[in-house]
Image (tube, helix red, strand yellow):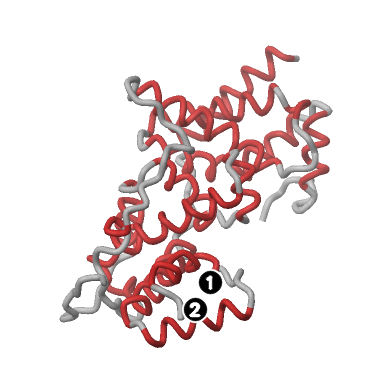
Amino acid sequence: MSSSPIEIDDEAAIVAQARRGDAKAFSELLRRYEGKIFRLALHITQNREDAEDVLQEAFLKAYEHLDQFQGQSKFYTWIVRIAVNQALMKLRKRKSDRSVSLDDAIDTGEDKVAREIAAWDENPEQRYTREEMNRILTAAIEGLAPIYRAVFVLRDVDGLSTEDAAEALDLSVPAVKSRLLRARLQLRDKLTRYFKRKGDDTFAYL
Amino acid sequence: MLTCKQFLDELSDYLDEKTDEALRQKLEQHIQDCPNCWVICDTTKKTIQIYRGMDPYQMPPDIHSRLVSALERKMARKA
């Protein structure tokens, strides 16, 4: 698909070329990851202007500090880490009275997790148009706390492994796992009102 | 026999197929016996599948252009 002369799968080589000052190689990294970084920034900040600032700051910082990038981790993991820090700084500036961190204590109240238990249609997404589905799914993510949003998007939308997500977010593996579980259960709960089988009455949990 | 809370604690690993065989069997036994947990498990699985199948994000062209311009300015300064 790409007309770039650079080998598609050899990311380490692209990064090495970029480190030697090859602008084309850095542009290739940008082309690969700008959409993912922008979407992640949008999910965390929930503000288009802030997300664009985060996107630019992340790529400019990555370019500037490319010599500090350690080859052991993946470039995407590294730039996600920069972007997440920038995005959290934006959130902190906006709510100056409250610090926002991925390490905020998490609410473990079970009642917040499983309020609505109702079976879904076999293929619930067929009830909605593509645009409606995108709106429903995006709005559900926006209803999560920032700590959950970042973990869920990296793991279940971008498809990062638990270990890579932990590295990108500077969290421990168990911390990523517990946040992912909460995020998944909360999203399930939010989506139930759209996808539950018609005629099924909700029954109380436990 | 697992409690519902124990089941929920392991749900993510179960859906990611990261549990060992002995635990997987216990979890599956629990779902068979507990209709609530069966529903939670089934709908959480569908939640993940639906998000994984989401349309790939299309980068807005204006934001892409401004990013490229900002980077070019930076590269020009560094050169």
Front: mark 2 or 1:
2
Q: CA distance from mark 2 to mark 1?
A: 8 Å
Residue A9 in the image: x percent, y percent? 76, 53
Residue A205 in the image: x percent, y percent? 25, 70
Residue A162 quadrant: bottom right
User: Circle 2 sits in a helix, a strand or a loop, which is it?
Assistant: helix
Q: According to the image, label 1 marks what residue?
A: B14
Left or right side of A102 for B76: right
Which quadrant: the N terminus of chain A?
Answer: bottom right
Front-most of A131 and A64? A64
Q: Is residue A115 depicted above or below A90 in this figure?
A: below
- The kind of residue tagged 2 is Leu
Residue at image x 51%, y 71%?
B15
Residue B13 quadrant: bottom right
Q: According to the image, label 2 marks what residue?
A: B27
Q: Are marks 2 and 1 in contact (CB under 8 Å)?
A: yes
Left or right side of B48 for A27: right
User: Circle 1 sits in a helix, a strand or a loop, which is it?
Assistant: helix
Residue A24 in the image: x percent, y percent? 74, 34
